[in-house]
Amino acid sequence: NPQPGYNIKYLMGVLNSKLISFWFIHSFGKLQRKVFPQFKVNELRVFPIHAINFADAADRARHDRVVALVEQMLDLHKRLHAAQTETDRELYQRQIVVTDQQIDALVYELYGLTDEEIKITELLET
């Protein structure tokens, strides 16, 4: 269970990652990445949230990087929604894709996935 000190955006980043989506579909046989799925309390209790050791500088830095990327993602979605031109919409959409990939890569690092495990996880349709 997450302890005090965790930023809610860290949890958002981990929960919305491809890795947790992959884990969820294989654990419970259901997932809709485009629409927030309905969770049962027992399912939420077993989510494998990576515990951060805030006394460890590297661990804290990974936590803070996830938070920064989620903040960037939220800002990009606001900009996409407010975009006036197709060019701007395409630009923001590309930036969203890149930021999403950066979050996924950081989550893979947090959980210590091998290249082979990442390839398997990446097969998940988004």
Image (spheres, grey):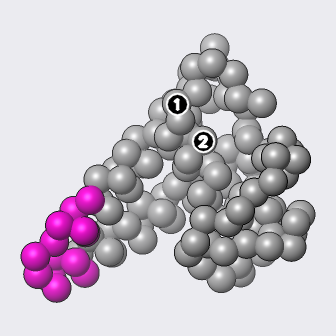
Residue kind at label 1, given as amino acid type: Asn
Residue 116, image x and y in percent? 79, 70
Position of 5 relative to 103 (above/below): above
Position of 14 relative to 84 (above/below): above
**Hey, which residue is sitting farthest left in the picture?**
84
Q: How far apart are marks 2 and 1 (CA)?
A: 7 Å
**Picture residue at 42% right of the left edge, 71% below the top:** 97
**Element on which disc 1 rests:** loop
Residue ID for mark 1:
7
The C terminus sits in image quarter: bottom right
Residue 95, image x and y in percent? 32, 67
Position of 55 relative to 77 (above/below): above
**Picture residue at 10% right of the left edge, 76% below the top:** 84
Does residue 82 appear to the left or right of 58 in the view shown? left
Position of 106 relative to 54 (above/below): below
- 116 or 65: nearer the viewer: 65
**Around disc 2, counting alpha carbons within 10 Å, would you say few (fewer than 14), some (14 to 19), or many (20 or more)?**
some
Q: Is residue 118 visible?
A: no
Does residue 42 appear to the left or right of 67 in the view shown? right
**Picture residue at 69% right of the left edge, 22% below the top:** 3
Residue kind at label 2, given as amino acid type: Leu
Mark number, residue 53: none
Mark number, residue 11: 2
Residue 88, image x and y in percent? 16, 76
Q: Can residue 25 be seen in this view?
A: yes
Which span of residues is magenta-colored? 78-90
Decide whether the magenta segment is chiefly helix, strand or loop: helix
Where residue 16 sits, quadrant-wise, is bottom right
